[in-house]
Image: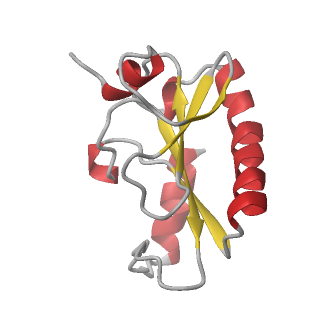
């Protein structure tokens, strides 16, 4: 099975590399939601967040923070979305762990996150909280 992100990581496909370390490769998204969107790619093939080991997960947020700082300094966005889709139903299109860092701009940048809020009964929330504990 071919994975486009593995091909990029292995140097088989071109990319605009922003950062590389032992765990991650950061590239410009080839099809960005907004100008300057970057992807943090796990260097080994793993499908979802739950598959990251302790070293990888411990390094991920400091790297995301560093990339946000670079984006803010260089591109001056009004805000930043950090997005990670985990599984096809959640919108993951490439089944290789990656984190999106999406700069947001004051003008309409065309990117939206839609959420229809619900209002479940408190008993249902309590039941779910117990299941998750």
Query: In percent of the image, x 42 and y 62: which residue is there?
Result: 33
User: Picture quarter containing residue 48?
Assistant: top left
Position of the C terminus by quadrant: top right
Q: Residue at image x 53%, y 20%?
A: 43
- Left or right, 93 with reference to 79: left
Viewer-side residue, 54 vs 77? 77
Looking at this view, is 97 or 120 the one in front?
97
Please identify the quadrant where the N terminus is shown: top left
Above or below: residue 86 compared with residue 121: above
Instruction: Name the residue rendered at 50%, 47% in the picture.
Output: 131
1 lies left or right of 132: left
Residue 9, horizontal then vertical, whole percent: 47, 20
Image coordinates for residue 60, horizontal then vertical, percent: 68, 34
Observer-nearest of 100 and 89? 100
Please say if 21 is above or below 123: above
Image coords of residue 17 (percent x, y): 57, 33
Left or right of 80 in this view: 63: right
Question: Is residue 67 shown left or right of residue 53?
Answer: right
Q: In the image, residue 106 lies at what x, y percent? A: 60, 84
Single out the residue that lies furthest toward the left.
1
Q: In this orientation, which residue lies closer to the viewer: 114 or 127?
A: 114
């Amino acid at each position: 099975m071919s994975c486009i992100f593995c091909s990029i990581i292995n140097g088989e496909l071109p990319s605009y590399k922003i950062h590389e370390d032992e765990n991650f490769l950061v590239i410009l998204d080839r099809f960005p939601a907004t100008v300057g969107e970057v992807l943090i790619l796990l260097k080994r093939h793993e499908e979802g967040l739950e598959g990251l080991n302790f070293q990888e997960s411990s390094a991920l947020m400091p790297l995301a923070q560093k990339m946000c700082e670079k984006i803010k300094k260089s591109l001056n966005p009004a805000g930043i979305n950090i997005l990670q889709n985990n599984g096809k139903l959640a919108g993951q299109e490439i089944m290789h762990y990656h984190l999106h860092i999406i700069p947001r701009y004051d003008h309409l940048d065309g990117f939206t996150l839609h959420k229809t809020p619900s209002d479940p009964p408190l008993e249902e929330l309590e039941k779910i909280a117990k299941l998750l504990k």
